[in-house]
Each structure stands twice: as C-alpha cells, then as structure tokens.
Image: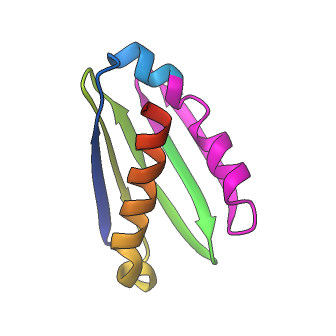
Amino acid sequence: MPGFSTKVPHQLGQDAARQRLESFLDTVREKYKDQVKNVEGQWNDHKLDFSFTTFGMKISGIMTVEEDHVLMDGTIPFAAIAFRGQIEQSIRDGLEKALA
C-alpha cells in the first residue's frame, strides 16, 4: 500500500502537545461525520495508532508526538493515491489547528 507522511512543528513540549491531541480522533469523528466511519485509535505513551474508513477506503497510521514536532505516517489504498496530497494537507491542517 502507498504511504503518506506529514510533519508539523510545535513549541508546546511533548506532554502538552499530546494533551492537545488526545481529542484529535474525536474531532475527526465529529467534523467529518458524513465522510468518515469506523474511527479507531489507541494511545501508547506518545504514539497514537489510528485507523478509519472514508469513502469505503481504509486509512491507518501512527501519529508520534515529539518534543518539537508531530509526525504522522500512514498507509492508504492504491485507489486513493490520487488524493494523497489532499489527505496529507487535511491532516496537516488539523494538526496545526490542534497545536496552535
């Protein structure tokens, strides 16, 4: 499966950034409720393993909260490869907003 990756800098420190992002999946669930289903996630220290389905395609990945940035890496189906840039930008925008 093709991958996607996005990195968002922040100045919050690792713990404060994680606190702000703990509700990230809830925000995705609410904001995109007509487009996203089966949103799941599990925090393990400063890493969030997540997955969701959008337009019948499963997207999954890991969000890692570091001291000065958040890195999100994931996989998308081949059918979504044309939308990789849009997916990355949407994720980046959401992370930037949550960390602002």
Residue 73 image point, x, y percent = 33, 51
- Residue 100 colored in magenta in the image: no
Count of picture labels: 0
Where residue 18 appears, as percent x and y from the top left, is: 45, 23
Examine the structure image and report whether residue 39 is included in the region drawn in magenta. yes
Towards the viewer: 3 or 66: 66
- The outermost residue toward the front is 100
Depicted 34 relative to depicted 8: above or below: below
Q: Quadrant of residue 68?
A: top left
Q: At 70% from the left edge and 57% from the top edge, which residue is drawn?
A: 38
- Locate residue 80, reporting x and y percent: 44, 80
Q: Vertically, is 22 above or below 77?
A: above
Q: Position of residue 5 (x, y in %)?
A: 29, 56
Residue 75 in view of the camera: no
Q: Is residue 99 above or below residue 1?
A: above
Quadrant housing the C terminus: top left
- Residue at left 40%, top 40%? 63
Query: To which quarter of the image does residue 82 belong?
Result: bottom left
84 on left or right of 43: left
The magenta region covers 20-48
Q: Quadrant of the N terminus?
A: bottom left
Question: Going 29% across and 22% down the picture, which residue do you hit?
Answer: 11
Q: Residue at x 47, y 56 (%)?
A: 60
Q: Is residue 63 visible?
A: yes
